[in-house]
Amino acid sequence: MNRAEREVSTKVSNFGLFQDAVMLESQVRRRTEELESALRDNERINRDLTREREEQRILIKKLEEAHNQLLQSEKLASIGQLAAGVAHEINNPIGFVTSNLGTLKNYTAQLFELLDEYVQAESKLPAETVQRLATAKQTADLDFVREDMTSLIAESMDGTARVRRIVQDLRDFSRPGDSEWKSVDLHTCIDSTLNVVWNEIKFKAEVVREFGQLPPVECLPFQLNQVFLNLLVNAAQAIPERGTITLLTACDGDHVSISVADTGTGMPPEVRDRIFDPFFTTKPVGKGTGLGLSVAYGIIETHGGRIDVDTAP
């Protein structure tokens, strides 16, 4: 092979190598583009999956909240039914006791009138009989018995009247079937709730009412009673020793406001920001469900209202 042939052969070989390099580069570029496209698709899929997981987490959380609030509502309804039944069972015997006390009061008055007649007739009795009667009166301490019996009957009648009032408040408070919107006096609702929860409050705080003039309000009374109950119990539990719970009501145009303030220790910002979260509680395990204020929040929202908290740590 002469020199010219060798040069032609070398050029042909180099051209072949160039073509191979161009083809290889094209394949690499195409493969790179495919990989980049696949990576972009993978990133998009990952973003979609992350977003879907977050949406799923939020939906699951909302579902759990709705489920637990439903359970809480059913529990409250069951408690309401139980309370209504207990109130009915208490009301019947209390009615008998009240009636019997009234009759006993009349009988006692008649008995004392008869004793007065005997006292006035003592002057006509023999001296020995008068002496025996005087001794018997002194032994029985008749003057004290007369005064104390009158006082005991009056206190018992006051007590039964209070029981009947509490029973009525309990029945009003716990109407489980009361699912209709009604125009009610919120002050009456608050007072009824106070009577029901009084045993929780009376040793912890003095209750101060600063009630304004409120118009009748369209609401679900049973649900608002639950709100008042939760707020009052929380206020009492926030007070470490003897304190004050102030109830303030006011009306501004078409809106009414109800404030429940206590002289408790307050709460830090991180607690304040979470008090309406379901299951959040600062109480020891087993001492609270963390649903009371969450349920109250949902009820107020259902009524188109707003519930806020203001506290100092």
Image (cartoon, helix red, strand yellow):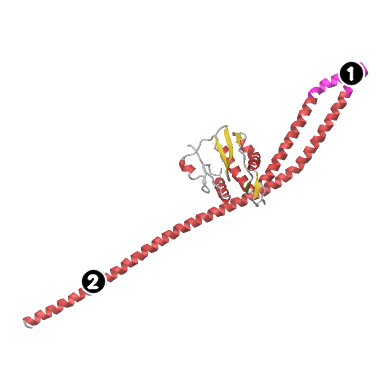
* Residue drawn at point x = 86 percent, y = 26 percent: 113
Q: Nearer the viewer, residue 222 or 51?
A: 222
Q: Residues within 10 Å of mark 2 (few under 14, many from 20)?
A: few
Residue flagged by tag 1: what amino acid is it? Val
Q: Secondary structure at mark 1?
A: helix
Name the outermost residue toward the front.
Answer: 253
Number of numbered labels in the structure image = 2
Q: Secondary structure at mark 2?
A: helix
Q: Which residues are magenta?
A: 117-145
Residue 122 in magenta stretch: yes
Q: Nearer the viewer, residue 220 or 142?
A: 220
Task: Tell me: 111 left or right of 161.
Answer: right
Q: Which residue is mark 1?
A: 130
Q: In the drawing, what numbered circle is on residue 25?
A: 2
* Residue drawn at point x = 85 percent, y = 28 percent: 111
Where residue 179 sits in the image (x, y, percent)? 65, 52
Q: Residues within 10 Å of mark 1 (few under 14, many from 20)?
A: some
Looking at marks 1 and 2 on the same chain, the residue that comes earlier in the sequence is marked by: 2
Residue 283 in magenta stretch: no
